[in-house]
Every structure is written in structure tokens, then in C-alpha cells.
Image: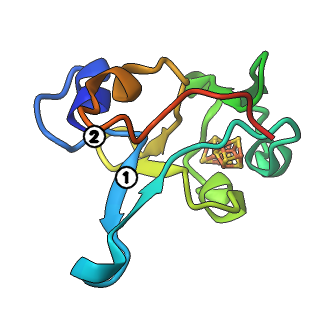
């Protein structure tokens, strides 16, 4: 999360496109909420302004100037991977750069083709 935030120029956790949350107790571990790079992304399908462009290889790219902050993409994502940037009032969209993969010391994350 810190690595992703740095990509957006933030030193904290205010801007991240990946979220690690508790699965509900120590025994149950943690859940990673991150974009799965859908080949037919529902987030893009519901965007009324065409602000989410299909990305080669799966997933989407945000054209921020077109975004009106309606949050329809947040509700449409089936894995809750569209996080919100309160400062810009726009979604934080994973660009699949792999910084989180490099930063994870336990090898939990990997980049793979979406679907
Ligand atoms: S918040 Fe922006 S990117 Fe998401 S659906 Fe609305 S206009 Fe499109
Ligand atoms: S943000 Fe959600 S719906 Fe959009 S491509 Fe990623 S996983 Fe699919």
C-alpha cells in the first residue's frame, strides 16, 4: 500500500489502489483487494463518460479529465478493487505497474494475466 501511494506522490496511505484488510481475526488472516485486470471490465461498462479506457492486457486506465466522480465504477467492480481518492474525488485505478509486487517481502503478490 505504501509503495502504491508513493506512485501517486503520497508518503502515507491516502492514495493507494491496493488495500490489505483483515479477514476477521488473527486466524483468518488478511484479504488483498486489488484489481484483477478484467478482460471485459464492468467498471468501464458502467462509466457514463467513457473515462475508463480498456487497457491492453486487461483492466482499465482512468482518463481523469473525463471523470465526473459519480462512483458508479466503485459499485460495479465485483471484487471491490476501485478505491476512492477523496482529495480529487475520483477513483484510484490500479495501473498494474508491479511496484507492490516488488515491495512485498513475502512474495504474496504476483502480476499475471487478468480474467
Ligand atoms: S467515478 Fe469517474 S471513472 Fe468512475 S464511473 Fe463515474 S465518471 Fe466513470
Ligand atoms: S477495477 Fe474491478 S471491474 Fe475494473 S478491471 Fe479491475 S477488477 Fe475488473
**94, above or below 25, in the image:** above
Q: CA distance from mark 1 to mark 2?
A: 6 Å
Q: From the image, tell me which residue sits under label 1.
A: 19
The residue lying at 20 percent from left, 35 percent from top is 2
In this orientation, which residue lies closer to the viewer: 95 or 102? Answer: 102
Residue 1, numbered label: 2
Q: Quadrant of residue 87?
A: top left
Please state if 99 lies on the left or on the right of 48 as rendered: left
In this orientation, which residue lies closer to the viewer: 23 or 96? Answer: 23
Disc count in the image?
2
Q: Secondary structure at mark 2?
A: loop
How was this image coloured?
rainbow
On the image, the x and y values in percent for residue 89 come to: 41, 46
Question: Visible in this render: residue 84?
Answer: yes
Please state if 86 lies on the left or on the right of 12 as rendered: right
On the image, the x and y values in percent for residue 47 come to: 76, 45
On the image, the x and y values in percent for residue 46 come to: 81, 52
The residue lying at 33 percent from left, 50 percent from top is 86
The residue lying at 28 percent from left, 40 percent from top is 1
Q: Quadrant of residue 109?
A: top left
Q: Secondary structure at mark 1?
A: strand
**Disc 2: CA contacts within 10 A as few (<14), some (14-19) or many (>=20):** some
Amino acid at each position: 500500500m505504501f509503495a502504491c501511494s508513493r506512485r501517486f506522490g503520497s508518503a502515507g496511505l491516502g492514495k493507494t489502489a491496493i488495500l490489505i484488510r483483515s479477514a476477521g481475526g488473527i486466524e483468518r488472516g488478511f484479504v488483498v483487494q486489488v484489481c484483477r485486470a478484467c478482460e471485459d471490465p464492468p467498471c468501464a461498462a458502467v462509466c457514463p463518460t467513457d473515462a475508463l479506457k480498456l487497457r491492453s492486457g486487461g483492466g482499465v486506465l482512468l482518463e481523469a479529465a473525463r471523470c465526473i466522480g459519480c462512483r458508479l465504477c466503485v459499485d460495479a467492480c465485483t471484487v471491490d478493487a476501485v478505491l476512492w481518492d477523496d482529495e480529487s474525488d475520483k477513483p484510484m485505478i490500479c495501473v498494474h505497474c508491479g511496484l507492490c509486487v516488488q515491495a512485498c517481502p513475502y512474495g504474496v503478490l504476483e502480476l499475471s494475466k487478468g480474467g
